[in-house]
Amino acid sequence: MTEIRRGWLLILASSAGIICSSVVLPFYTIGALVKPLTSEFGWARADVQLGILFSSGLGILTAPVVGLLSDRYGPRALVLPGLVGLASGFFLAASMDGQLWMLFLAYGAMAILGAGTTPITWTRAIATSFDRQRGLALGLTLTGTGICAMLAPAYAVWLTERFGWRGAYVGIGLLPLLLAGPIVWYGFRPSDPAAGGAAVPATAASQHWGLTLGEAIRGYRFWVLSLSILAVYMAVSGISPNLIAALTDKGFSAASAATVQGAYGLSIIVGRLVVGYLVDRFWAPAVALVSLSLPVAGCLVLTGSDPSFAAAVSAALLIGFAAGAELDLMAFFAARYFGLRHYAKIYSILYALLAFGSGTAPMLFARVYDVTASYDISFYIAAAMFLLGAAILPTLGSYPQHVRATAGH
């Protein structure tokens, strides 16, 4: 029986947790709440969007703590309180009375109280529970981000239309409790001595070996991977929330632009699965070089003269594929090159860089538009970032000798 078949319940629980995580759920639902909040309280749209930057900034601070606690106590000890904490943040948002600081407090609470639901915990569980099919298992788990990108905005719109923005916040807050909670409680039992589970044991060599955080930082591979992650995620996070605005500027209707955005979300899922499958069979830096270079063409299509609908969809598919690949690759590289023994600590630092890019890039790309009245320069910058992030990864070299046999290389 394959590892995937034996560990399907852990993958399902982890994917449900990703869908309802503090990184994904607030990011993909705030768009539906911007207009209702600005209409009621007179806030600027930028003020509302600043909530995401605020929560991402706190995510940078909490990531190392989550990594340390996850390595010490196991991820299960963190994810269940984290789901409750995230829900509490949404419920707090439902009680806002027009004070802008309450919005920032609510989104900050989502980041701090829901810190246990970040990808640090879910990917640690998968990395320690799978070995020969680790890449595919990570891909299946992280499809949760694409699923949330496709479904959560529509759910938030539906709630807002029927129950108002307060009801929407309550309805979104119920998802971690009623959707992810029961699945995670029953199925999230990773193969991790600290977590008390024994789902799908990895090989002894890969399970017990690992660089310390200090050893990883002193090596060049950590900095190559850090630079690649920051470059790619700045590009991805700059494009995603600005894509609809950029397309409507080029003459697309709002409905057509939303369809292109939907293609982007679907491609995230495809990227997760395809790259997860490939890195189990081929040298991962080569897979990364190809997959992260694809959006360069997509970015160039979106610049200059107005693209056709088919061209815009194609561009969104290429960019979305890379967006899906990057989180898989980050987790896979961290496990293969640095080992599992201190995986969560090392991954948490890499994740902090990701959170920094995710929180700042949307604002920076929008600022370029404010100055130039066009997103073209932003797309050129994104293309250069994708190219940089892809080109440097082959310098990671061969996998460490003791894990090469289990990786099939």
Image: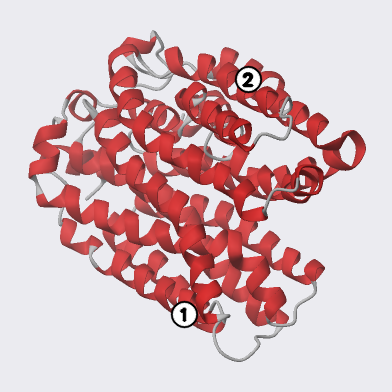
Residue 23 in picture, x, y percent from top left: 52, 38
Work out whether 192 lies above or below 339.
above
Residue type, label 2: Ser
Residue type, label 1: Ile
In the image: residue 104, left or right of residue 170: left
Residue 382 visible within the image: yes
SS at mark 1 in the image = helix
SS at mark 2 in the image = helix
Closest to the observer: 172 or 149?
Answer: 172
Closest to the observer: 379 or 147?
Answer: 379
User: Which residue is at a point 25% across and 57% down the rendered structure image?
Assistant: 227
Work out whether 344 lies above or below 233.
above
Q: Which residue is mark 2?
A: 88
User: Which residue is at a point 46% across and 23% down the rendered structure image?
Assistant: 116
Work out whether 281 lies above or below 159.
below
User: Which residue is at a point 80% across and 74% down the rendered structure image?
Assistant: 253
In the image: residue 345, left or right of residue 144: left
User: Which residue is at a point 33% across and 55% down the rendered structure image?
Assistant: 230
Residue 2 visible within the image: no
Point out the tag, 2 or 1, that comes first from the N-terminus: 2
Q: Residues within 10 Å of mark 1 (few under 14, many from 20)?
A: some
State the scheme by which the image is colored: secondary structure
Tag of residue 183: none
Give the number of callouts: 2
Closest to the observer: 348 or 57?
Answer: 57
Tag of residue 377: 1
